[in-house]
Image: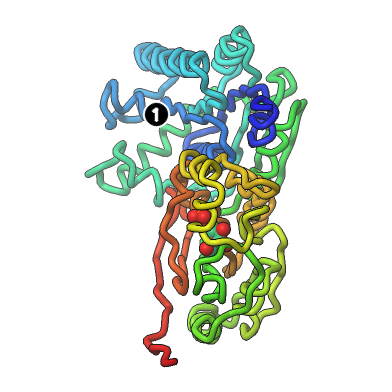
Amino acid sequence: MERTQQVLTSLRPPRAQRLVVVMVGLPARGKTYIARRLSRYLSWLGYRTHLFNVGVRRRERIGAQQTHEFYDPANADGVTARRAMAHEVLTEMLGWLREGGEVAIYDATNHTRERRNMVRTACEREGHPVLFVESLCDDEEIIASTIREIKLKSPDYAGVDPEAAVRDFSARIAHYQATYETLDSWDGSFVKLVDVGREIVLHDLRGDLPGRLVRVLMNLHIVPRPVWLTRHGESECNLDGRIGGDPELTRRGERFAVRLVEFFDAHASRDDDVQVWTSALRRATQTARHLPAIPVVWRSLDEIDAGVFDGMTYAEIKAAHPDEFRRRQEDKLRYRYPRGESYEDVIQRLEPIIIELERQRSPTLVVTHRAVLRCLYAYFMDLAPETCTRLDVPLHTIIELTPNAYGCDVRKIPMDDPVVEVG
Ligand code: F6P
């Protein structure tokens, strides 16, 4: 019985899958950005994921400020030093996988067959499948903006005159270009992204995990836009602390629905095709009903299903089912309500919502519920699923998330009105 329960409540397949994702590409092609996005997605889904970055190791070992000559393939000392660091990080990664890690992301240029062969052979020798992810980009504007926005702000060029830094960095790219070999069928499984996903080439993908990663990669973009998350307005169940149900809004909740229109009008410019998404529950659709945009109603945004405890208060559950109550306190992420859901289940059903949210290039307002909002927030803020189940998410507060190259900017906007109910 215990075993069945364990398998059923796990997000991951019963036998842990292992995978090594190996990034490939010239400098300033967004490899680290892509690697971080994959890592955030996988960690959120519950995979033990870790990023192994060779550039970070180089800065630790020999200091950040190496000029382009260090990267010249004719510089034998540079070649030896770089190979040694790549090897060191690889060894560390294999050790981490041996100790129970599941998905390792190896972030370096890996721009020659010889280097890729070294990485792949070492991984496959220990039984770990390898997926190469190459980012190719010839769009001068994208490259220039990556250099400006990311490279010039990195420790490699701290305090260096920006023009000199661009010159040096361009020379560094040219050194890699001189020996660059793009992926081909010889490399095995790979995904090749051209110009941030304008074109995608897939080769010999096997298993469920690479397929999931392709869906993330296909929807990557770098257009900044906000995602606004809010709970529904106050409901009748909120007043007496009952969980679940399908209650109506209270008068205070209704006032929030009206204030939401003011927020929408103030923040959504006329040119933006703002999306409004709600759950299928009454308190959410009622909260969105005055908005000028027609909401898209998603069942998968419905609140966590409390199963047989739906409609009860926490005090009632604790009194009538103390063991269940305790089990939930002990492991809120994995605890599944009898005939209901766990937070892990909610994350699972939110996966298509995340992919769809990532795809959007215009602002999106999501009107949903406490547990669902916690899970969405955890994804954008790269929080471990364990920590998200107790996040404080008050009613009548809009959380504005703006994804950027490094992570996500967050702003909490309280929207409660000052009116005090009488009678
Ligand atoms: O109390 C409001 C509510 O949205 C319930 O419907 C839901 O069961 C609960 O919050 C989720 O929060 P927690 O996981 O902390 O019980």
Residue sitting at x 62%, y 83%: 291
* Circle 1: element type: helix
Location of residue 147 in the rendering, given as x and y in whole percent from the top left corner: 42, 46
Residue of label 1: 55
Quarter of the figure that contains the C terminus: bottom left
Q: Residue at x 50, y 67 (%)?
A: 241
Q: Nearer the viewer, residue 51 or 326?
A: 326
144 or 397, which is in the foreground? 397
Residue at coordinates 69% horizontally, 57% vertically from top-left? 300
Q: Quadrant of the N terminus?
A: top right
Q: Amino acid at mark 1?
A: Gly
Q: Is residue 76 above or below residue 409?
A: above
Please indicate, yes or no, whether residue 227 appears anywhere in the rendered image.
Answer: no
Q: Is mark 1 within 8 Å of ligand 1?
A: no
Q: Is residue 60 left or right of residue 360?
A: left
Q: Position of residue 344 (x, y in %)?
A: 60, 43
Question: Is residue 340 at all visible to an observer of this figure?
Answer: yes
Q: Is residue 378 left or right of residue 299?
A: left
Label 1 crowd bin: few (<14), some (14–19), many (20+), radius 10 Å: some
Question: Could you tell me which residue is drawn at 52 percent across and 22 percent down?
Answer: 101
Q: Residue furthest bottom?
A: 422
Furthest residue to the left? 159
Q: In the image, residue 22 lies at what x, y percent?
A: 57, 26
In the foreground, 328 or 207: 328
- Residue furthest front as drawn: 320
Is 242 placed above or below 318 here? Answer: below
